Amino acid sequence: MPYIDKNEVARIRKELKNALPNFKISVIRQHYFSVNIVLLSGPAELTKREHEQVNPYYIKENYTGEAKNVLLKVSKIASKKQHEQQYDMDYGSIPNYYINISIGDWDKPYINTNK
């Protein structure tokens, strides 16, 4: 069963803060099996919308320029210790934890600080 402990979430939070010091990022554990990463503000135009869910498997295909670079960096840091935990006949390979990335939150839109 997927599980992420608070130490791994703290590692992700610290590495993101060091890698993207000008961004305000929320990193929390949700339901013991996933990490939620929300980009709240930063000096880059990441999306035209107020809120956008990011599929970490399709960042290269769906984003360009600075948004692509920032999101790939976030995904790489978050998935550094992610690996296939087990194989299930019904669900296929199951990772040891899930990663959810979004630009802005449902009640807090992303703010571009360069404007």
Image: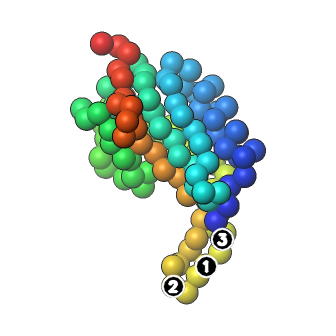
Q: Earlier in the sequence, mark 3 or mark 1?
A: 3
* Residue sitting at x 54%, y 34%: 26
Badge nearest the viewer, 1 or 2: 2
Q: Is residue 38 left or right of residue 47?
A: right
Give the residue type at disc 3.
Met
Give the residue type at disc 2.
Asp
| Callout 2: SS | loop
Q: Position of residue 70 (x, y in %)?
A: 44, 33
Separation of residues labelled 2 and 3 (CA atoms): 13 Å
| Callout 3: SS | loop
Outermost residue on the right side: it is 7
Separation of residues labelled 1 and 2 (CA atoms): 9 Å
Q: Which residue is mark 1?
A: 87
Please identify the quadrant where the N terminus is shown.
bottom right
Give the residue type at disc 1.
Tyr
Badge 1 vs badge 2, beta-carbon distance below 8 Å: no
Q: Which residue is mark 3?
A: 1
Q: Choose between 19 and 6: the one closer to the eye.
A: 6
Q: Position of residue 32 (x, y in %)?
A: 65, 57
Q: Which residue is mark 2?
A: 90
Badge nearest the viewer, 3 or 1: 3
* Other residues around mark 2 within 10 Å, as few (<14) / some (14–19) / many (≥20): few
Outermost residue on the top side: it is 115
* Residue sitting at x 63%, y 35%: 13
In which quadrant of the rendered view does residue 28 lie?
top right
Q: Is residue 58 above or below residue 112?
A: below
* Other residues around mark 3 within 10 Å, as few (<14) / some (14–19) / many (≥20): few
Q: Position of residue 47 (x, y in %)?
A: 29, 33
* Residue sitting at x 56%, y 74%: 93
Whether residue 65 appears in this view of the structure is yes
Whether residue 103 appears in this view of the structure is no
